[in-house]
Amino acid sequence: MKPADPAPLPPVVRWIDPIWPLESAFATTRRILFSPFQLSRWLLLGFMAWLSQLTHFGITGLQTQASRTESKLGPIRWDVSSRFASDLVEWFEQVLSTVRDHWIWMVPLLAFLGVLALTVWVALIWLNSRGDLVFVAGVTRNETGLSSPWHEFAREANSLFRFRLALGLLQALLMVAFAGMMLLGGLRYMTLFDIELLMLLTPMGLGTLFLLLVGWLTTEFVVPIQFTRRCGCRKAWGVLGAQMIRFPTSFLLYLLVQIPLTIVTVLAVVLFAVLTCGACCLLLVPFVHVVILLPVYVLHRAYPLHFLAQFGSGWDAFATGGSQPGH
């Protein structure tokens, strides 16, 4: 038995360990990428990982977006004057004023840009859904090409795409509702300590956190369940929900382990960028940074796979290789 493979479990599983799968994930990463090292396989897995990250923000992406927002609206001042909210409302009013003054060409232009942005967004979600299942296949099986898993898991990927599309639309509706309330409710006259503002932000913040959690659980667990059981996204969610009810403590501990794991990962990436100097610029290139940091992506993909493998033989993606259609 390979060192990265999980040990067999008794028929009745009473405890799911969130720590041991992390050790197996490190072993899997070493075995896949370095035993032996093959540049062609590294690049293939890098492309698979890149597809699975198309709709995700990286560290540099978040920093860039934050700096752009700050340059447009100025530094966010968390004081009682709520200057940030006032500036945001004024910006919306300026946009509406510009559209009213030049509506003859602005309306068709905005409509075209909106349709184009929507098309690109839908295409990225579709590619990301296909890429997630392809990347799982690349980690669990010795894939030598992209075509085979791309077509093999098309049905599961399409189901995942529809679920993520609906989830994304719900997130967009929350954002539109928030922007509309800001314009209609006159947030410029509120402060960050007004009860009206807190009552407005609390349900939307909780709703956003819930949708983000659903999206994270989908990527971490639902995608591997779809891979091993060859089922749709809704059925995989039903299977996952039953196990979360059965082992709530284990899933909570898994979530808590993600906190130090993410911190260590970020520190390792920063240290790598500082020590290599020249590679710091390469980390800003979309596809290249995934290839450079491929061990990080493989580790984070292998970890939930080994975690789920503890539920039994039918959950082990490394043993089944996604060969259970109809389950």
Image (cartoon, helix red, strand yellow):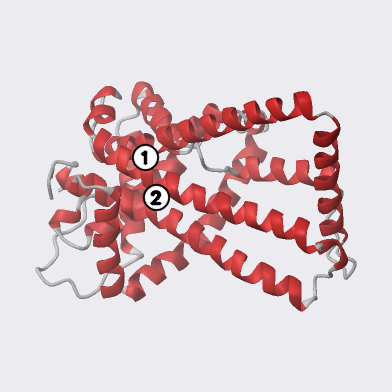
Residue 267 x %, y %: 60, 51
| Residue indicated by mark 1 | 132
Looking at the image, residue 286 lies above or below residue 211: above
Looking at the image, residue 204 lies above or below residue 64: below
Q: In terms of sequence position, does the residue under pointer 1 or pointer 2 come before the other?
A: 1
How far apart are labels 1 and 2 at the CA level? 8 Å
Q: Badge 1, how many Cα within 10 Å: few under 14, some, many 20+?
A: many
Looking at the image, residue 95 lies above or below residue 267: above
Residue 77 x %, y %: 86, 60
**73 with respect to 291 (left or right):** right
The answer, for residue 58, to whether it is visible in the render is yes
- Looking at the rendering, which quadrant does residue 235 occupy? bottom left
* Closer to us: 137 or 108: 108
**67 with respect to 137 (left or right):** right
Residue 116 x %, y %: 58, 27
* Closer to us: 51 or 3: 51
The residue at 57%/52% (across/down) is 173
* Closer to us: 320 or 112: 112
**56 with respect to 280 (left or right):** left
Tags 1 and 2 in contact by the CB under 8 Å rule?
yes
| Residue indicated by mark 2 | 219
Three-letter amino acid code of the residue under disc 2? Thr
Q: Specify the farthest residue to the right.
A: 81
